[in-house]
Image (tube, rainbow, N blue to C red):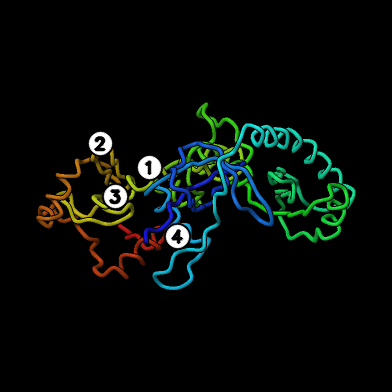
Amino acid sequence: MSAEPVYEVRFKGRRNEYFSWAAPDPLALHQAVIVDADRGHDLGRISAVGDVAATKCSRCGACGAGGEGAEPRRRRILRPATPEDLGTADRLRKDEDAVRTVARERVREHALPMKVTDAEWQWDKKKLTLYFTSEQRVDFRALVRDLATRFHTRIELRQIGARDEARRLSGVGRCGREYCSAAWLPELKPVNLSVAKAQHLSLNPAQISGPCGRLLCCLHYEHDFYVESRRRFPKEGKLLRTAAGEEKVLAVDIFRDRVTLRSDAGATRIVPLAQLDAEVAAGGAAPAPTSPPKDGTPQKRRRHRNRKRKGGGGSVG
């Protein structure tokens, strides 16, 4: 017996869940459907079908499986949505702005350190989910009772991060296009400063942060290219034996395949990577040895320099 086909269904705020469909007639991409939801029914749109949906569902792992090799316990798509169902959903979307306003007023009355970001009605109005951000844990039990009395439904308060807030509300980034997180990114990966450092970007937060106040999601796009490209180059700060003697790597240019070097004497030169590899492989040409100070060992040379700094140790003629 073949397994039931899997469909990815998208709801408000790019919230995705996976459902099975038992009827023989396949469902189309972007088709509106009524699905089995938490203690009721909800309306969403098909966002992935076939092998794509099955692969994404297997990576999700939210529904789990009954054991090794067992099928995940997915909820079901009940039926395609009718025009009346779509009209009900449209009315609920328009009502959510007023719901969010009321919720924010209640938050101020309860003096809670939280910001209500969005509101989402379940299609059958048996549940109202309020999304909020906060820098700390919030005891919102009294708020939930207050809102349940006001809206006469089950209330769920869900804390989200700054990136998830930008994903739900969307907007236009500095590139002039919709936020990637809201437009197409399938998942939000954490971004740290090491990604910016690897690309030699400015570490000024104002220049590498998005509207959400976190580092730009797009910093990840070229990160792998920079990591792979730098593997061909010596690390900055490394000492190499070259044709000019012992030199320190100051900087690398992965786009022009060049390396900037500095000798002990302070001379700087820029050489192609291929030439540098050849010099290092040859062990460096034999440079003219520098004349060491007459007083021999490194310890004596350091004492000699220290005496000169203090104004002593010179010979009297």
Residue at coordinates 46% horizontally, 38% vertically from top-left? 29
- Secondary structure under tag 1 reads loop
Q: Which mark is residue 195?
A: none
- Secondary structure under tag 4 reads loop
Name the residue that disc number 1 marks.
222
Q: Upstream in the sequence, badge 2 or badge 1?
A: 1
| Badge 1: residue crowd in 10 Å (few <14, some 14–19, many ≥20) | few
Does residue 278 appear anywhere in the picture? Answer: yes
User: Label 1 is placed on what type of residue?
Assistant: Glu
**In the depicted structure, whether residue 75 falls above or below residue 164:** below
Q: Upstream in the sequence, badge 3 or badge 2?
A: 3
With 211 as the anchor, is 27 left or right in this view? left
Q: Upstream in the sequence, badge 3 or badge 1?
A: 1
* Residues at marks 2 and 4, CA–CA distance in whole angstroms: 46 Å
User: Label 4 is placed on what type of residue?
Assistant: Lys
With 207 as the anchor, is 24 left or right in this view? left
**For the N terminus, which image quadrant?**
bottom left
**Which is nearer the eye, 7 or 17?**
7
Name the residue that disc number 2 marks.
256
Q: Which mark is residue 228?
A: 3
| Badge 2: residue crowd in 10 Å (few <14, some 14–19, many ≥20) | few
Q: Position of residue 6 (x, y in %)?
A: 45, 52
Instruction: Tell us which disc is closer to us: 2 or 1.
Output: 1
User: Label 3 is placed on what type of residue?
Assistant: Glu
* Residues at marks 2 and 1, CA–CA distance in whole angstroms: 17 Å
With 159 as the anchor, is 107 left or right in this view? right
Outermost bottom residue: 67
Q: Upstream in the sequence, badge 4 or badge 3?
A: 3
* Residues at marks 1 and 4, CA–CA distance in whole angstroms: 53 Å
Does residue 192 appear anywhere in the picture? Answer: no
Q: Position of residue 143 (x, y in %)?
A: 84, 55
